[in-house]
Structures are given as C-alpha cells and as structure tokens.
Amino acid sequence: MKQKNMVYATLLIGALMLSPSVFAQSWESLSTDSQSTLRPLRLSWPNLSDTQKQSWLKRVPELKAMPADQLATAQERMAEWTALSGQQRAQVEERLRNSKQPDPLARAKLWKSFTGQ
C-alpha cells in the first residue's frame, strides 16, 4: 500500500509539473525581472490563457538577454499585440505561420502591415 501511494504521488507531481496551469500565475506573483520584461502585458495578463502565460514566461530569459534597443522593440511589439482583438491576433498568427519568409526583416515588414505602421 505504501509503495502504491508513492507511485500515485509521483504521478501527481509529474502531472502538475507538466500542466500549463502551474504557470497560471497572477501578475503580482511574477518575479520583478519577469514583470519588468513583460511590462506591456501587465493589463492583459489576467485575460491570457494558461498556455499563453507559460509561453511568455518561457521567453523572459531570451528577452532579458537582448540588447536594450532590441528589448525596447520587442516590448513595443508586445504592446501592439495586446491592442489587437482576438480575431486580429488569430489572423496575424495564421499569416506568420504561413509566411515563407524566415528573414526577420521580412517578418517585421509583415508585422507592420498588420499594425498599420
């Protein structure tokens, strides 16, 4: 019986570690670094899905490693992204997914066509 309980406990812990809901943190519970890096998402954070939150939190180290000018550009894009409606976001994601343009400049141009800039 004791061994069976250990197996169940191990499975439960493993499931929790893999579950996106583990990452469903409130804005206030994020580290100062994460809050600073993801600042443009602050107001929309409660409305993001668990998967979206997990995705953004995984990007924090990459974003923090960027030179200041690149981080500023990324944060501008985050702000633009939060201003889009759900339908507009879906359209952008679809077009970026279907884009045959891996070049960052081409992708930036495609992004600007969506944001009207």
Image: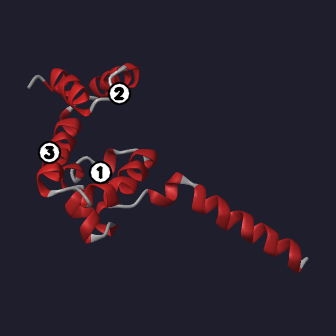
Name the quarter where the C terminus is drawn.
top left
Q: Label 2 near label 3: C-beta < 8 Å?
A: no
Q: Counting other residues with Cα less than 10 Å from the Cα at mark 1, is it few (<14), some (14-19), or many (20 or more)?
A: some
In the picture as drawn, the residue positioned furthest to the bottom comes out as 2
Residue drawn at x 33%, y 68% is 29
- For disc 3, the marked residue is 73
* Badge nearest the viewer, 3 or 2: 3
Residue furthest front as drawn: 103
Q: Is residue 92 above or below residue 39?
A: above
Residue with the mark numbered 2: 93
Q: Which residue is mark 1?
A: 45
Residue 22 in percent (x, y) is at 50, 60
Which residue is depicted at the point 57% across and 54% down? 19
Q: Secondary structure at mark 1?
A: helix
Give the colour scheme shown: secondary structure
Residue type of the residue flagged with mark 1: Trp
Q: Is residue 90 above or below residue 65?
A: above
Give neighbour class at mark 2: few <14, some 14-19, many 20+ (Cα, 10 Å).
Answer: few
